[in-house]
């Protein structure tokens, strides 16, 4: 049961006589920040004072007298200028917990009106190795997908692969000029990665050289010498990465026009050049193999994987249709959609005839609307693309797609400890796979440390420790990302993500293992507790606090979807684990050695509910648990 939702429904009834539309007021019915004011609080009386021309306290009294919550709450209290404080009744909590414990879905029934939602996430540009920047879209999208599914919505995940862009020009050129035939035959995926990296270095060298020349010319006129020096050093560093290696340098010198050549290879691919098309078809499965290995490690699957190439045959029609409807027109030779409120138009076809990222996205949108009839399409993409999506959505509205909810679920950057985008010491982007390996290695150290410190001696075999570390390492990376407000940047840190005493996956998995351990120690099958759960009477403050948190699981999941923020769920799970820890470490709350048999069963029910809430909650975030840790 969604408790907050239920309370808001009750308040809506009580408000009906006072206001025409109670909805805006209901947003001010919320869980309290401070337990002293009860469990929930309604603050709207102050906002109503002016329109109703009555003192807020009087309004609060009026609402309370019309409010029917006796079955759920103690008699409401009015505090201060007109806050309405609600405290859940102990008997109601007990019965609620009993019902949750008996239900495999913890009392969370699927929504009665499921929405159809397409989520576009991960969507890497293939042909280059996945790097740390890809983690955010992948795990945030996956968490939203799983949460919506659990709540009963019809969700379709689509990995909108970048499989048609310049990066193919890079490997096409690389393949034609630098491939190691032997290596390509034996390890094609590794060889393509090597080629991409090499190409990237050579292109970057020439680009940095050109910028360096331009900068030198401005030396005399530069007004900020410090900034000038910094720019200079950065460019020199980029040049040095190639220049320090005689072999690389000689390659770079033999290919001075490499950047233009890459664009030409891409253009040839798009124009249907048979050789490039054939190579593209040969490379694609290799590129997919590369990214699928990472998805497999992360436990990520997609319902669809329709990349940019899939939409190429539809682009001409999209442009024609927009022109036909008078939405797009030619300006400076390019086909543009001019949009109110934007400084620049959205270009859908360049003067040389080439289509753009935006054109593909328009075709994708049309395709999704026609094939899936979604109520919402969510794009989980980097904040740097917000202008693109604002224009895309504005165009979609003009095009006639008015009712669908279109959302750019944007997110910030992963930073290094120096506060800059996370890079290797050499300044390269960090390969995702290496980062995951390192997280697992750190996790193994933590797991060993925890296991060695157990009072009865170590519990896990070497093999088990490795298996646990594998789960914990991957969980830590995901959780660290999800636990931050998605719109902020965050600092990547192995230390922090694997800390056992904070808002981390390690802490939550450890709490889960502790619950399991109680059952193992007592030789109790949790299934048996679930078959005949006791209604916990909550004699101590710790038990009540835990119980209140447990009954909030449903409303928390719904809350995640209000603004598509998985960190609402991570905060919640952390709260549950902390409250469990306070309960579990309190000598007055012994579980297996409880004073009476009844109390023991009630506490076992609480423990089981805690474990399952953690497990289901983490599953909604795409994180597995381990039975022992
Ligand atoms: N491939 C793009 C990139 O790496 C992201 C695509 C996001 N999805 C979309 N429909 N535009 O920047």
Image (cartoon, helix red, strand yellow):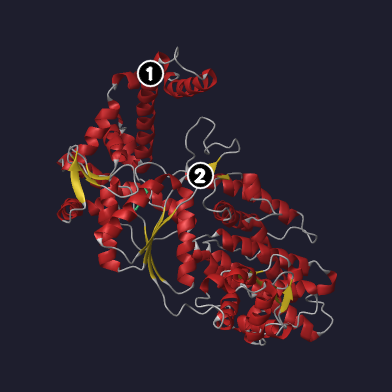
Quick check: 87 left or right of 428?
right
**Quadrant position of residue 268:** top left
**Quadrant position of residue 592:** bottom right
* Residue 434 higher or lower than 114, as above or below: above
* Residue 605 higher or lower than 251, as above or below: below
Quick check: 574 left or right of 180?
right
Quick check: 342 left or right of 622?
left
Q: Residues within 10 Å of mark 2 (few under 14, many from 20)?
A: many
Residue receiving disc 2 = 413
- Pointer 1 and pointer 2: residues touching (CB < 8 Å)? no
For the image, the number of numbered tags is: 2
Residue that lies at the very extreme toward the top in this rendered image: 220
Q: Secondary structure at mark 1?
A: helix
- The image position of residue 424, as x and y in percent, is 52, 35
- Which disc, if any, is residue 255? none
Q: Which quadrant is the N terminus positioned in?
A: bottom right
Q: Nearer the viewer, mark 1 or mark 2?
A: 1
Q: Is residue 107 visible?
A: no
Residue receiving disc 1 = 214
* Residue 213 higher or lower than 336, as above or below: above
Q: Is residue 537 visible?
A: yes
Residue at 49% across / 39% down in the picture?
A: 430
Q: Secondary structure at mark 2?
A: loop
- The image position of residue 229, as x and y in percent, is 51, 19
Residue at 26% across / 67% down in the picture?
A: 371
Q: Which quadrant is the C terminus positioned in?
A: bottom right
Cα–Cα gap, marks 1 and 2: 29 Å
Residue at 24% across / 54% down in the picture?
A: 311
Residue at 25% across / 29% down in the picture?
A: 261
- The image position of residue 256, as x and y in percent, is 29, 21
In the rendered structure, which disc, 1 or 2, sits on the residue that comes first in sequence? 1
């Amino acid at each position: 049961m969604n408790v907050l939702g239920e309370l808001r429904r009750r308040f809506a009834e009580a408000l009906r006589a006072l206001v025409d539309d109670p909805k805006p007021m209901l947003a001010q019915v919320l869980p309290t920040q401070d337990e002293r004011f009860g469990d929930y609080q309604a603050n709207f009386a102050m906002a109503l004072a002016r329109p109703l021309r009555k003192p807020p306290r009087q309004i609060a009294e009026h609402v309370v007298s019309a409010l029917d919550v006796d079955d759920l709450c103690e008699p409401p209290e009015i505090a201060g200028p007109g806050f309405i404080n609600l405290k859940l009744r102990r008997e109601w909590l007990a019965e609620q917990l009993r019902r949750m414990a008996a239900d495999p879905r913890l009392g969370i029934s699927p929504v009665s009106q499921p929405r159809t939602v397409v989520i576009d996430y991960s969507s890497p540009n293939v042909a280059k190795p996945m790097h740390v920047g890809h983690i955010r879209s992948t795990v945030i999208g996956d968490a939203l997908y799983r949460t919506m599914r659990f709540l009963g919505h019809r969700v379709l995940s689509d990995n909108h692969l970048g499989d048609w862009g310049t990066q193919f020009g890079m490997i096409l050129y690389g393949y034609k000029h630098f491939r190691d035939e032997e290596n390509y035959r034996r390890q094609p995926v590794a060889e393509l990665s090597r080629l991409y990296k090499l190409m990237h270095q050579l292109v970057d060298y020439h680009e940095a050289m050109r910028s360096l020349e331009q900068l030198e010319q401005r030396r005399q006129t530069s007004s900020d010498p410090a900034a000038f020096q910094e720019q200079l050093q950065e460019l020199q560093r980029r040049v040095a990465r190639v220049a320090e290696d005689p072999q690389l340098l000689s390659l770079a010198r033999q290919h001075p026009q490499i950047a233009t050549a890459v664009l030409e290879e891409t253009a040839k691919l798009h124009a249907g050049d048979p050789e490039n098309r054939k190579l593209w078809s040969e490379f694609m499965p290799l590129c997919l193999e590369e990214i699928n290995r990472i998805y497999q490690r992360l436990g990520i699957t997609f319902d669809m994987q329709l990349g940019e190439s899939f939409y190429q045959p539809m682009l001409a029609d999209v442009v024609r249709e927009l022109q036909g409807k008078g939405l797009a027109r030619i300006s400076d030779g390019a086909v543009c959609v001019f949009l109110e409120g934007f400084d620049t138009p959205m270009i859908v076809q360049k003067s040389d005839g080439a289509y753009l990222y935006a054109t593909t996205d328009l075709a994708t949108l049309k395709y999704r609307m026609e094939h899936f009839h979604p109520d919402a399409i969510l794009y989980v993409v980097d904040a740097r693309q917000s202008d693109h999506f604002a224009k895309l959505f504005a165009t979609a509205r003009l095009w006639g797609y008015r009712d669908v909810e279109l959302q750019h679920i944007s997110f910030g950057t992963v930073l290094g400890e120096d506060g800059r985008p996370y890079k290797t010491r050499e300044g390269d982007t960090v390969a995702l796979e290496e980062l995951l390996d390192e997280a697992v290695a750190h996790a193994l150290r933590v797991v060993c440390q925890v296991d060695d410190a157990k009072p009865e001696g170590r519990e896990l075999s070497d093999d088990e420790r490795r298996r646990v570390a594998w789960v914990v390492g991957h969980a830590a990376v995901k959780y660290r990302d999800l636990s931050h407000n998605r719109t902020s940047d965050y600092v990547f840190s192995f230390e922090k993500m694997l800390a056992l005493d904070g808002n981390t996956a390690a802490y939550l998995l450890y709490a889960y293992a502790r619950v399991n351990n109680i059952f193992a120690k007592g030789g109790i099958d949790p299934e048996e507790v679930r078959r005949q759960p006791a209604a916990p009477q909550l004699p101590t403050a710790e038990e009540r606090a835990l119980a209140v948190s447990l009954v909030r699981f449903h409303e928390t999941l719904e809350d995640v979807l209000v603004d598509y923020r998985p960190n609402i769920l991570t905060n919640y799970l952390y709260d549950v684990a902390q409250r469990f820890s306070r309960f579990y470490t309190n000598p007055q709350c012994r579980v297996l050695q409880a004073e009476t048999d009844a109390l023991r069963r009630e506490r076992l029910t609480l423990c089981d509910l805690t474990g399952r809430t953690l497990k289901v909650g983490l599953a909604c975030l795409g994180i597995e648990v381990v039975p022992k840790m």
